[in-house]
Amino acid sequence: MNDQDYVGNVGRFNNIVWDMMNDLRSEAASASNKSADKSVNITDNQKAYGYVWCLPYLSVGNDSTTLETLRFELAKIEAATNRFAKENMIGKGGFGEVYRGILSDGKEIAVKRLTGSSRQGAVEFRNEVQVIAKLQHRNLVRLQGFCLEDDEKILIYEYVPNKSLDYFLLDTKKRRLLSWSDRQKIIIGIARGILYLHEDSCLKIIHRDLKPSNVLLDSNMNPKISDFGMARIVVADQIEESTGRIVGTYGYMSPEYAMHGQFSVKSDVFSFGVMVLEIINGKRKGCSSVSDGIDDIRRHAWTKWTEQTPLELLDSNIGGPYSPEEVIKCTHIGLLCVQEDPNDRPTMATVVFYLNSPSINLPPPHEPGYFKRDRIEGNKTTNKELDNISDSINGITLTNLFPR
């Protein structure tokens, strides 16, 4: 139910639903079947119905208390960002705006202020917070808190000082600051972060929007995956899922997802492969289009591979020494990840194994699949929708919350 469409007093609605869900959470935790349901009156003619089922991984500790400790008052966020001053804005996209903030104790934070057009209601927003808060890995941006006050929906993350990976890839001078050891560390860190989402966290999560702008770099150039606005939670043993609404960023979407709406963990593997090739080459070629189709990094890398000159893919502006063998191995892994058939792509566990193995015989890659805009437009995506894809409008889709 969209509270803004059906209820005049949004604040009152949010408070009633919040109290109901808190009561249900406590009742479900103590119930023998770990579930509870109830209804409450919103108006004389309207009711809200709630149902809570405690999953095993949620039964440890007091989640209600945990969620409350993450709540920030709006006044505190406004003070930290100087009332969302323009000079503190560090990012902007279809989802809203990101601001740098400084709390009263001197701690720096990143404040993600979602737009009013977000499709999420209050309960869904809190669910997102509760799920993201459970994701703790050194290669994921950590959630510090949230604010749901008045009409504001705000997420507070740790502040990562070196901006995003594309900040370096889009600037020739800044690319020179990325040594091969930095690039290799970034590739391995991203791989470990994705592996955690796919196999090692309490939930199986498909990110669906992996790209350089969603990889932040800390003061030591360690990568941290961010932005779970497109993420899907799936059943642990589920192989594939479909959607009629294509979201993500063109150039990083796998062919099966872009053309048919089919996604799986192998969709994230494809996006990772594109990023690996871009990190090696030092340029963002994943999204550039030309009149005869897509001139992307996959075609460029495959050409160098078949010509047996893979080192020519390496960024000519790279500074410092590098290992030719490691460059070739990373290129090889990148090509394996962007295979057209999802079954030909390795899992992220296999990718991490490849990256950490000093010497290993990798399977030969096939030619990557290429697909043009008109092939996508002829399927599920219109011109207008395709233009919007690159904006990656974030509204997390939490479906099928199943433990591993």
Image (cartoon, rainbow, N blue to C red):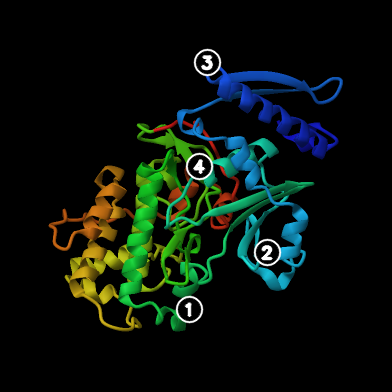
Q: Amino acid at mark 4?
A: Lys
**Residue 322 in view here:** yes
Asked whether, in this view, residue 309 is left or right of residue 18, the answer is: left
Q: Quadrant of the C terminus?
A: top left
Q: Amino acid at mark 1?
A: Asp
Q: Residue at x 66, y 36 (%)?
A: 123
Q: Residue at x 41, y 66 (%)?
A: 222
Residue beneath disc 1: 171
Q: Amino acid at mark 3?
A: Ser
Residue beneath disc 4: 380
Q: Residue at x 42, y 57 (%)?
A: 138
| Numbered disc in front, either 4 or 1 | 1
Q: Residues within 10 Å of mark 4 (few under 14, many from 20)?
A: some
Q: Amino acid at mark 2?
A: Leu
| 66, above or below 23, in the image | below
Residue beneath disc 3: 32
Q: SS for tag 4? A: loop
Name which of mark 3 and mark 4 comes first in the sequence: 3
The picture places residue 200, in percent across and down from the top left corner, at: 36, 43
Residue beneath disc 2: 103
| Numbered disc in front, either 4 or 2 | 2
Asked whether, in this view, residue 60 is left or right of residue 193, the answer is: right
What is the CA distance from the residue labelled 1 to the residue labelled 2? 31 Å
